Amino acid sequence: MEEVRKIETGPRTVTRQVVVNAPAAPLFAMLADPRRHDEVDGSGTVRADVRGPERLSEGARFSVAMKMYGLPYRITSVVTAFEDGRLIEWRHPAGHHWRWSFEEVDGRTVVTETFDYTGSKGPRVLELLRMPALNAKGITATLAGLRDRFE
């Protein structure tokens, strides 16, 4: 079983990667459908209440119910990059980005998830709240769950 690996992608980014025993298409399909994000989420913050298109595309907006520290809230994100079957990225209202990439190799897929807060409206606030460390933990759990789902 492949371990989730830390990948260095520069300052103010948190990136993890894992190899999943599945082709890229079904993995990408899960992320391209915002209604399935709660199935993938390892952080425990994403809820099933989603508003938006059934399949994301560049420029699409989607709204997700969230819960953190026991407090419910809703965020609306905008898809900022979309390459069918390979890459999807969205921007959080606070300016940071979540990026997923999928690279199929011999029927298996290298899945990479990145939390990039270089463009955040308050990067120091995120650091003071320990969000990079919390997101690293959540990303690791997300990727491990995805790997285990297809094991």
Image (cartoon, rainbow, N blue to C red):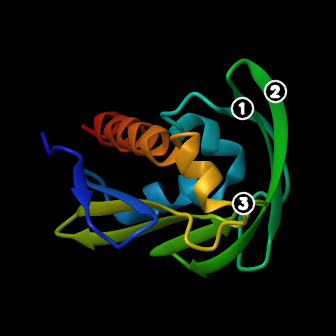
Residue 44: give x, y in percent of width and height.
Answer: 57, 27
Nearer to the camera, 6 or 111: 6
Residue farthest toward the left in the current orientation of the protein = 1
Would you call the spot at circle 3 few (<14 residues within 10 Å), some (14-19), or many (20 or more)? some
Q: In percent of the image, x 71 and y 45: which residue is there?
A: 35
Q: In percent of the image, x 36 and y 59: which residue is there?
A: 15
Q: Helix or strand or loop: what does disc 3 sit on?
A: loop
Q: Nearer the viewer, mark 2 or mark 1?
A: 2
Residue 17: give x, y in percent of width and height.
Answer: 29, 57
Residue 42: give x, y in percent of width and height.
Answer: 48, 34
Q: Callout 1, which amino acid?
A: Arg
Residue annotated with mark 1: 47
Q: Callout 2, which amino acid?
A: Pro
Residue annotated with mark 3: 92
Q: In percent of the image, x 60 and y 50: which residue is there?
A: 126
Q: Callout 3, which amino acid?
A: His
How far apart in space, not on screen, are marks 3 and 2 (Cα)?
A: 16 Å
Would you call the spot at circle 2 few (<14 residues within 10 Å), some (14-19), or many (20 or more)? few
Task: Mark 2 and mark 1 in contact? Answer it, CB < 8 Å.
Answer: yes
